[in-house]
Image: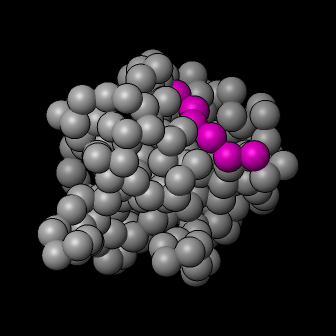
Amino acid sequence: MLFIGLLIMQTYNIYQLLKEELGNGSSDLVTRKSGQVIRERIERDIENEKDGEVIALDFSKIGVIDYSCADEIVAKLISRLLSGEYGDKYITLTGLNHNQKENIEVAVERKGLAVIAEMDDGKKGLIGDLNNYLKDTFDAIQKNGKITAKELSEIKKLEANTSGTRLLNLHKKRLVKKTDEIRNGVRVWVYEKL
């Protein structure tokens, strides 16, 4: 378990899951069937996590991940996350090398999805498919840590309903957390980075 600010992140070591589920001595994730076995294990583990949990899939000890495995594990997990199958949870990727990123990015882009990924060099960002205006809003949240619709309106010179819609869309894509706070005696929605 890793603490990031006030957020608690559960890390799933994909290499360890590969060893436990397939036991074939390889550090590579290849074939759709292998990806299905790993995804099903992750899904069983996700069921036991609390709502609001951020789950980091750690690829740092994985060698190759081919497109079919990337599609089966990452794209399907993100797609099912967005459909509400896992409740109020979030998924990020960590420890990716550039070859892994390429295959994962193709898999999520083909399904019109996006996910937050941290590379093995520590650089963090989005991979996949996201409109430019949502990327811009995402970047504002990353810079500020958390933001309200009113604050985004002021920063980006947007109408209040436009900023609220952008923030809500990022939350629906599970790229930011949505919480409520009392500010000056009024309850407001706050959108936080993962």
Q: Position of residue 25 (x, y in %)?
A: 78, 59
Based on the picture, tell me whether residue 127 belongs to the magenta stretch.
Answer: yes
Q: Position of residue 134 (x, y in %)?
A: 41, 29
Based on the picture, tell me whether residue 8 belongs to the magenta stretch.
Answer: no
User: Magenta segment, which residues?
Assistant: 123-128
Task: Single out the residue that lies furthest toward the right.
Answer: 121
User: At 62% across and 41% down in the image, what residue appears?
Assistant: 125
User: At 21% across and 51% down in the image, what residue appears?
Assistant: 84
> Where 91 falls versus 44 (above or below)?
above
> Where 79 falls versus 147 (above or below)?
above
Q: Would residue 29 be visible to someone looking at this image?
A: no
Q: Nearer the viewer, residue 149 or 178?
A: 149
Q: Nearer the viewer, residue 110 or 34?
A: 110
Q: How is the image coloured?
A: one colour
Q: Nearer the viewer, residue 139 or 153?
A: 153
Give left or right: position of 83 versus 137.
left
User: At 75% across and 46% down in the image, what residue appears?
Assistant: 123
The majority secondary structure of the magenta stretch comes to strand
> Where 36 falls versus 20 (above or below)?
above
Counting the numbered discs, the total is: 0
Q: Position of residue 74 (x, y in %)?
A: 49, 42
User: At 32% across and 77% down in the image, what residue appears?
Assistant: 50
Position of the N terminus by quadrant:
bottom right
Q: Quadrant of residue 97?
A: top right
Q: Would residue 161 be visible to someone looking at this image?
A: yes
Q: Position of residue 35 (x, y in %)?
A: 53, 44
